[in-house]
Amino acid sequence: MLRKAQVATPESLHALVTVLLKRLELQIWSELMEGLMASNCCTDYLAASKEAVARFPDDKVFPSEVANAESWFEQRQNILQGYVDDEEMTTGAMASTLYNGGVYPTAYPWMTEDLVTRSDRSIEKVATEFSSASSNCVVSKSTIRLASSPEEVSETDVLGVVAIKDILAQESVLFDPTLAAVVDSAGRCPACCGPILDKIENPCCRTSYCSFSCSQRALDSYHTVVCGKDFDFLYETKSVSSSSSTESSIGSKLLLRVLALSIRENTANPLQSSLISRLTPAYNPNDPQLIAFNFIDHITTPIRILGELGLDVFTNSMYDTWVLHTIHCRLQNNKHGQTFDDICGTAINPLYSMFNHSCDPNVDWRHDHENSTVTMFAERNIKKGEEMFISYIGKGDSLKDRQRKLMPWFGMECACHKCDEEKVEAMAAGMTI
């Protein structure tokens, strides 16, 4: 006898959807733990496995995940404690290492060309900003070429900074105020990290700045986007070492600042904002270097920040996790840390990042005041038309050490004139580099 076809009812459909969603949730938790293991995030893996058991008490696999996580955590903790006992590691570094895993700063493979290269509009904006900040140098085509021969046209030829007149040694060449800065103290200006001596409060709230110009710069750029929103979670103390907690907190606040700048500009994609588009990441496919990663600081917190800003990463692909990772990589390669009376801060200055590297630089930088404004100055006499270089790694290292340190920036060996000369000398002496 033929069976009578069953008719779906709202109740049966609801029950089916509930079962399917539960299966999907279980699969997501399984893949999350797999990813945390691959990222060497043993603390996050332990926390996630325990939460998975609480969410799925009937699952037969997750309890074994907890056992594996606890064993892994204990093993790693004992190894690190051995380093501490042998005075090869501090207790703070141990806590940070336990708390963090690592990921490679890899470029998203399906990123479109307009998100990788600087647009003509962004280059014009940088050039205009340079004209306002300096009377003796401009942004121009660099003498550095990535083409295989001097005659070949390369789409990846880079920009640099060129002197437009003769410059004397120690002469200031550029004043670069901070566009995005954060400092771990309420007694410091949130715009420039300087001390707040004459308190200037925003008319919209009680946020204090060191000067009217800083207050106005904040209002014109990022403040209206964040004003009145609840970001208290960025100031919560984490149960890790104070240095690690401070560093991750500052990193999250810097991300908030650059996201607010992007939203205020109303660009189609945050990677096209005037600040982020000019920053280059340190991808190095030939010798990739791990950067610190943990689930809270690099996934949960950015999503919470975007949610408070009114953006949903699950419906707005412009703020997908690969975009956040790309922003993080660009900030990681261009931010500069600074300490103000033992108070940690970090900043992104929009212009000094346009200077290219040389191991024999003709320009250096300093902080003339108690804030994050960068003053660039000539280290020696510079002729009109000469390109101006800074060192990304300081001075005094051997050729081998310089090449190793610079590999994350270039993805290949440094080819500045100093390195080329020392390579020739080393080869002539029969030395290996």
Image (cartoon, rainbow, N blue to C red):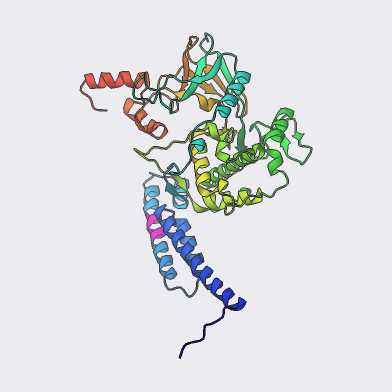
Which residue sits at x=48%, y=57%?
Answer: 44
Q: Nearer the viewer, residue 239 or 309?
A: 309
Residue 365 position, x and y percent, is 53, 22
The front one of 292 and 313 is 313
Give the residue drawn at x 47%, y 52%.
99
The question of residue 106 being in magenta is answered with no
Report whether 25 appears left or right of 131: left
From this view, report whether residue 376 is shown above or below residue 26.
above
Judge whether residue 350 can be spotted in this image: no
Q: Is residue 33 left or right of residue 123?
A: left
- Looking at the image, residue 431 sits to the left or right of residue 365; the answer is left
Which is the main secondary structure of the residues drawn in magenta?
Answer: helix
Q: Which range is magenta?
A: 72-78
In the rendered image, residue 346, in percent from the top left (x then y), is placed at 57, 36
Q: Residue 53 at x, y = what percent?
A: 49, 69
Check the image and report above or below for 70 versus 374.
below
The quarter of the rendered structure image containing the N terminus is: bottom left
Relative height, residue 193 to residue 173 (above, below): below
Q: Quadrant of the C terminus?
A: top left
What is the x, y in percent for residue 192? 64, 31
**Above or below, 365 relative to 26:** above
Spot the residue most to the bottom: 1
